[in-house]
């Protein structure tokens, strides 16, 4: 039962992360890797605020969101300078830089590899010690977020933003700026990234640089590519299946327990490679745009 | 100042950058897997030398050849233009992770090196001259490189005329593969390496690509030398922490991408 609860919590966290990631891919076939950089940054802010200043989960979320806004501005600047494939490369290097910096900031974590002893209290003294209660919290957060996303995507504001980003070049030739829509979408992605990874941080009560290695991206991209044609509910379903498989691979008997991590990464990177080839081959690139 | 250390590192970074530049300028794909091919082939050769050819090494060789030739062949023949750029970025990143984890899975994670005496300065100079002459001949003198440039720049026209370009593709694959094999040999006999270092060689190669913004391949060696001297000065003489090495390079790459992205990507413009 605990395993099922763990899978559902994990799946909800990753589905929140994935749904906005796939939004970027759908607009411009850009993988915005800075998303993971924002996730990492907000996670460290939340955990350090919690361990050093005893700030609750709700409090750390708002402060880390404020701190990630400058990050969002950097990504916005990158999007102004680079387009298409080059934007993906730029954000990828941005992500690797933040990952490296996580190794160089040991003075913040009392010279430990990661941040541990994160206390799971939602607000003031109200703690969430049991996984069942955390599951209820995750269900509430997911329902609010996905509900909001579902209705937001039906509004003309959203369609206007998408249209402006997709037709950026035409708008530029007419001297119409699409900066506001870009900035808003990037800030929204920062918000979702902060929410998702705050939930992750307070669930595991420990984070380290290895939590944000490419293996996290493997999971997110697998979910994104497999749920490309589905709506938000489909994303959650695909996340549950993928993460059940990911966690279930731990229990394989014929693999040396010390090498299970590598075995899982091999399987999932193979899945991403095959799915990427199939999906990119099938879609009509220009029509999708 | 250790001249052999400087010259050796220059040759290594020069070769890494040249491979990145060739792959990017001829195939128009940004291959994140180059570092992993390098490291993985080093591990295979180390294990073949130590344990001879066994089932494990044969399976590793097959995986390396399939991942290099098949993946690149599919990327070049099944995708064109922007699709190739996007899918190559995703696929090569995961190929590198696949190889990283596969290598750790079958060979475990320890570092490897082949025992040998330190290469003397004359051998290093001779090595450098040979590589430089071969590459100079290929890029500047031979008509082959001009044919390659023409093919990649007029790819759609060539496909539309049903001209088969496969033989050219395979020749270029083999050239890049031989360069990779040469590089791992130099790495193995001069230092110990770990599979996890694939990303660092890629980052340094990228940084030198930026330094070559004038798009002249002959200058790659000079800028690799400048980089090695800077690295030596900062981290050996001024005693900056080695932990900040990659951070500094990455910070510079991100700043260049923010303010002068053409420095990195101007290499795609080729002149016949």
Image: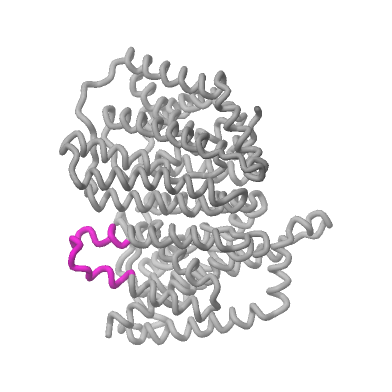
Residue lying at the far front of the rendered structure: B162
Answer with the quarter of the image where residue A138 lies.
bottom left
Foreground residue among B150 and B36: B150
Q: Could you tell whether A262 is left or right of A278 in the image? A: left
**Does residue A220 lie above or below A213 as drawn?**
below
Q: Position of residue B8 (x, y in %)?
A: 36, 24
Q: Residue at x 37, y 73 (%)?
A: A202
Q: Residue at x 58, y 68 (%)?
A: A23
Residue B121 seen anywhere in this rendered image of the structure? yes
How many numbered circles does the render carry?
0
Q: Could you tell whether A101 is left or right of A282 in the image? A: left
**Does residue A214 lie above or below A19 as drawn?**
above
Characterize the magenta stretch by its predominant secondary structure.
helix
Q: Position of residue A194 (x, y in %)?
A: 49, 69
Q: Position of residue A259 (x, y in %)?
A: 23, 58
Q: Could you tell whether A29 is left or right of B17 in the image? A: right
**Does residue B156 lie above or below A159 as drawn?**
above
Foreground residue among B84 and A109: B84
**Does residue A192 lie above or below A145 as drawn?**
above
Answer with the quarter of the image where residue A249 lies.
bottom left
Q: Quadrant of the C terminus of chain B?
A: top right
Foreground residue among A111 and B90: B90
Answer with the quarter of the image where residue A288 lies.
bottom right
Say whether residue A248 is magenta.
yes
Q: Which residues are magenta?
A: A246-264
Foreground residue among B253 and B44: B44
Residue lying at the far right of the rendered structure: A174
């Amino acid at each position: 039962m605990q395993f099922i609860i763990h899978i559902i919590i994990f799946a909800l966290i990753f589905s929140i992360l994935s749904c906005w990631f796939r939004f970027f891919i759908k607009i411009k076939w850009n993988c915005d890797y800075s998303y993971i950089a924002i996730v990492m940054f907000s996670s460290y802010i939340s955990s350090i605020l919690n361990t050093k200043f005893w700030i609750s989960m709700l409090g750390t979320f708002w402060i880390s969101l404020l701190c990630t806004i400058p990050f969002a501005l950097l990504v916005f600047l990158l999007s102004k300078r680079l387009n298409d494939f080059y934007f993906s490369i730029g954000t990828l290097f941005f992500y690797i830089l933040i990952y490296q910096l996580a190794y160089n900031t040991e003075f913040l974590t009392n010279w430990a590899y990661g941040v541990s002893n994160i206390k799971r209290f939602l607000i003031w003294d109200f703690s969430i010690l049991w996984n069942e209660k955390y599951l209820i919290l995750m269900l509430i957060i997911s329902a609010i977020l996905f509900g909001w996303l579902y209705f937001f995507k039906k509004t003309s504001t959203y369609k206007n933003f998408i249209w402006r980003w997709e037709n950026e070049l035409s708008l530029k030739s007419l001297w119409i700026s699409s900066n506001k829509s870009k900035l808003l979408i990037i800030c929204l992605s920062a918000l979702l990234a902060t929410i998702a990874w705050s939930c992750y941080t307070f669930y595991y009560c420990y984070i380290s640089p290895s939590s944000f290695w490419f293996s996290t991206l493997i999971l997110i991209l697998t979910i994104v590519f497999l749920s490309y044609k589905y709506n938000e509910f489909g994303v959650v379903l695909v996340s549950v299946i993928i993460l059940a498989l990911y966690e279930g691979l731990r229990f394989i008997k014929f693999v040396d327990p010390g090498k299970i991590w590598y075995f899982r990464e091999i399987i999932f990177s193979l899945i991403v490679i095959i799915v990427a080839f199939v999906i990119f081959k099938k879609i009509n690139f220009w029509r999708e745009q | 100042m250790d001249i052999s250390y400087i010259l050796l590192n220059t040759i290594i970074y020069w070769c890494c950058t040249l491979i990145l530049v060739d792959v990017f300028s001829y195939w128009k794909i940004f291959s994140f897997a180059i570092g992993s091919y390098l490291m993985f082939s080093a591990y295979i050769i180390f294990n073949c030398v130590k344990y001879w050819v066994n089932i494990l090494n044969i399976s590793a060789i097959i995986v390396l050849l399939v991942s290099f030739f098949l993946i690149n062949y599919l990327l070049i023949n099944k995708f064109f233009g922007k699709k190739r750029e996007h899918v190559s970025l995703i696929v090569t990143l995961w190929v590198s992770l696949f190889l990283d984890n596969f290598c750790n899975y079958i060979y475990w994670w320890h570092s490897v090196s082949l025992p040998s005496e330190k290469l003397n300065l004359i051998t290093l100079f001779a090595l450098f001259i040979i590589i430089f002459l071969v590459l100079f001949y290929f890029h500047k003198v031979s008509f082959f490189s001009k044919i390659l440039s023409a093919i990649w720049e007029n790819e759609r026209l060539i496909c539309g005329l049903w001209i088969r370009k496969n033989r050219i593709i395979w020749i270029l694959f083999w050239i890049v593969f031989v360069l990779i094999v040469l590089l791992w040999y130099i790495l193995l006999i001069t230092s110990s390496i770990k599979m996890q270092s694939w990303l660092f060689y890629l980052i340094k190669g990228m940084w030198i690509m930026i330094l070559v913004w004038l798009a002249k391949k002959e200058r790659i060696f000079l800028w690799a030398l400048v980089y090695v001297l800077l690295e030596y000065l900062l981290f050996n003489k001024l005693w900056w922490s080695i932990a900040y090495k990659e951070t500094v390079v990455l910070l510079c790459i991100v700043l260049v991408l923010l303010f002068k992205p053409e420095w990195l990507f101007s290499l795609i413009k080729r002149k016949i």
